[in-house]
Image (cartoon, helix red, strand yellow):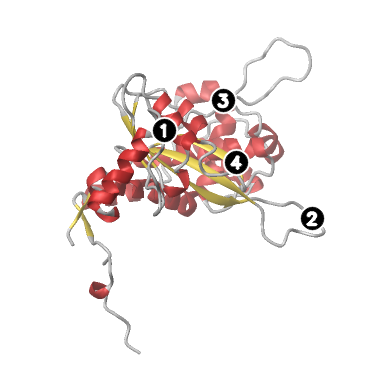
Amino acid sequence: MKYPKRSQYKYAKSQYRIRNWPEYEAGLKRRGDLTVWLSTSALHAWRAPANGKPGGQRKYADVAIEAALTIRMVFHLPLRQTEGFLRGLAEMLDVGLPIPDHTTLSRRLKKLDKIQFRGLASDRPIHLLIDSTGLRIHVGHMQNPPRYRAWRKLHLAVDADTGEIIASDLTARRTHDCTPVPGLLKQIADPIASVSADGAYDKRAVYEAAHGRGEGRAVRVLIPPRRNARLSPRPSAALQERDLNIHSIRELGRREWYTQSGYSKRSMVENTMYRYKTIIGRSMRSRSLDGQEIEVRLASKILNTMITLGMPDSYRVA
């Protein structure tokens, strides 16, 4: 049996080349660099200040717990090995820092403050890309574990211009994709120019949430409606974007609309999901929801830091 050639497929896969390969290759090497330094400000902020209240005092500041958990996630270490890694690092640098033990790291993870994982906010309008994926979770020591392994649903909002994660949410596995969208948009203080998502987000709540962030300006919503979608009988200001998409798809065709409207850029958020599962992992380490939410924000900060080291600048050749 002869299989068809790639060129004979209905839609052949596009080929791309990278313009800045030397810079991107150097950035990939820097991601694995083990050069470690501790600034004077970090050394002074490592120990928690006394709060003046009676009882036991915290010994480690949040920056110390966050640094330890970052090393744990980047190098995929259990908590005990993370403790040993930090002790060996402190001895090599001869800094005499107290190192939190593994039980302290597990306990303090749930009590960390909100981790700011994005850079400085800008006044430019943001083209937002939204998608979701599943992450497996630990079910504990159950005598009768579930037939299908439990998992959480991760929701990410990515800046289309920079590839930076600017909002995240974690929900139960049965939560609809469109449900967390209003909460994701509330996390973003910058003006929003457009919102792109796949067909699972073709719901009234998504259009209304995007329209509410317009602040007097029109927010372009690029969501492909289903094949047999009909125009709204009583279109509101929010649903006008959906009707515009239906008209454009009928005139241009679905694939041509993907290209002309800019919807094809949504692949960047899918690449972000792939990078998350490849670099961070497909499973969550924390067992409580509070710890899992902090873990997601910390993972987003790690990925955003890696973006600053270099990203590919590709172009289509065929």
Mark 4: secondary structure: strand
The residue located at (37%, 39%) in the rendering is 242
User: The residue under label 3 is which amino acid type?
Assistant: Trp
Residue 96 pos. (x, y %): 58, 30
Locate the N terminus by quadrant. Answer: bottom left
Viewer-proximal residue among 38 and 204: 204
Q: Are marks 2 and 1 in contact (CB under 8 Å)?
A: no
Residue 46 is tagged as: 3
Q: What is the spatial separation of the Cα atoms under label 3 and label 2, in whole angstroms? A: 38 Å
Q: Is residue 279 left or right of residue 138?
A: left
Residue 234 is tagged as: 1
Which residue is the extreme one toward the front? 233
Mark 3: secondary structure: loop
Mark in the foreground, 1 or 4 = 1
Residue 142 is tagged as: 2
Viewer-proximal residue among 124 and 302: 124
Q: What is the spatial separation of the Cα atoms under label 1 and label 4, in whole angstroms? A: 33 Å
Mark 2: secondary structure: loop
Crowd band around label 1 with a 10 angstrom C-alpha radius: few (<14), some (14–19), many (20+): few
Q: Are marks 1 and 4 in contact (CB under 8 Å)?
A: no
Q: Are marks 3 and 2 in contact (CB under 8 Å)?
A: no
User: The residue under label 1 is which amino acid type?
Assistant: Arg
Q: What is the spatial separation of the Cα atoms under label 1 and label 3, in whole angstroms? A: 59 Å
Crowd band around label 2 with a 10 angstrom C-alpha radius: few (<14), some (14–19), many (20+): few
Mark in the foreground, 2 or 4 = 4
Mark in the foreground, 4 or 3 = 4
Q: What is the spatial separation of the Cα atoms under label 2 and label 1, in whole angstroms? A: 52 Å
Q: What is the spatial separation of the Cα atoms under label 4 and label 3, in whole angstroms? A: 33 Å
Residue 162 pos. (x, y %): 31, 37
- On the image, which quarter does residue 47 sit in? top right
